[in-house]
Image (cartoon, rainbow, N blue to C red):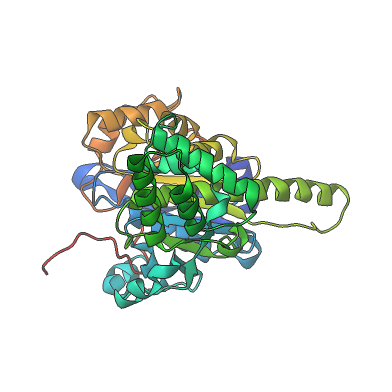
Amino acid sequence: MIHQTVVGRLKEETRKIGIKGSAYIGKHIVGKGEDAHLTTKVYLDLIHPHVILICGKRGSGKSYSAGTIIEGFCLLEEKFKKKSAFVIFDPIGIYWSMKLPNKSQKTLLNEWGLEPKGFDEIKVFVPKELVESYKNAGIPVDFGMEISFSELDAEDWILAFGLDPLSEVGVAIQKNLNALKNEKQEFEVADLLEKVRKDSTISSSAKNAILNYFNLVRSWGIFTKKGMKAEDIVKGGQVSVLDFSRVKGGEWGLRNLVAAWLTRAVYRNRVMARKEEELAKLEERKPNYTFPLTWFIFEEAHNFCPSDKKTVSLEPILNIAKQGREPGVSLVVITQMPNKVHQEILSQTDIVISFRLTSKQDVEALHTVSQIYMREDLLKLISELPRWPGASIILDDNLEKIFTVQIRPRISHHAGGTASLI
């Protein structure tokens, strides 16, 4: 007899291992309106790879609920936790607060049988040249982040700047950057700027445009000659928060470039690790190469993988959505506008956590996710949710069910609440 619901996990496996390797995220809501009440606990599977959509209007609890999943990871048994890692792309600067306990909701936590707790597993990465700026703003920083400028291709920069690759500026970037790659294994922004200045075939207007673009890149303080590797950021048992909230000027270009670089690197490493894991199993030995199963979380996901334009991060994230399950890379996209997230990501989603949505287009986007067995009217289900903060519906393609769930209170501090004068 199964008494627990583990979203994302088949019943047969839940019968076998129960709630091991899962995150406690909330309780079932039974009834409607004033008759609604909470019943049994709901968990989320963290053993297997998933593609998860978390959506809802502003302030409905999207980031808060993502925090419960991360807390669940931090509380896993060591044998599970050490084999996985979380990476959060945080453009709004709220996940650093998970280092601290949620003392402001202690009374509510007591009602749920929980205690406030901060997590040492949370490690905050920011552009290296901006470390002092973050610290002066009271944001704890663990690492200054650097990426080798030479690891990105001309096409990446053209997409990041929104340029036409066949324009004079686009062609000149390709020509000079490719020439540098042929001359050197490692180089920095200053090397490209010098090469462009010396290129007599570029018009002065195009040259000035390129110099302006890459002087902006220098101001980001993250692209250097020698940079970090994926292994420096993605580590077993760790939650790496990539906080870009204090970057000024072209910030989405930077965020998308870093997302493209890291998702590609992690996917490659997991493909290699997966092959080695299978060989080691067949040969009855320990793997010679390991890399943790990785969960990517994207806040404001419609900017990283939009439905209406091509960004430098789009194709690498689509690859994770379509191909990530086999090597063990999970994807969580968080947005208030699911209709603005690329259709191919929605089609690969196996779990949806949805709070209140007011836009017809956004509800219709959820219908594209739901399968034939989900015949309920999602708009009706969402509109019937209790008016409590954290009330949601969860669509689970693995169990082929829709659940109404109250997300539990966070045990770590949440810095993403709405600003108030009180």
Q: Nearer the viewer, residue 268 or 66?
A: 268
Q: Residue at x 57, y 57 (%)?
A: 187
Position of 192 with respect to 339 (left or right) is right
Query: Is residue 46 visible to us here?
Result: no
Q: Quadrant of the C terminus?
A: bottom left
Looking at the image, the residue that sits furthest to the left is 421
In the image, taking residue 399 as reference, residue 48 lies left or right, namely: right
Total numbered labels placed on residues in the image? 0
Which residue is at 57% across, 60% downward? Answer: 234
Instruction: Give the quadrant of residue 403.
Output: top left
Report x, y in % for residue 147: 52, 59
Q: Position of residue 272 (x, y in %)?
A: 72, 48
State the image coordinates of residue 158 (x, y, percent, origin top left).
Answer: 44, 39
Choose between 195 and 86: the one closer to the eye. Answer: 195
User: For this view, does 51 lie left or right of residue 105?
Assistant: right
Residue at horizontal 64 percent and vertical 59 percent from the top: 83
Residue nearest the observer in this picture, 131 or 353: 131
Q: Is residue 244 above or below residue 256?
A: below
Q: Position of residue 73 (x, y in %)?
A: 52, 60
Judged left or right of residue 378, residue 296 is right
Q: Quadrant of residue 131?
A: bottom left
User: Which of the 4 quarters of the picture holds residue 359?
Assistant: top left
Q: Residue at x 23, y 36 (%)?
A: 383
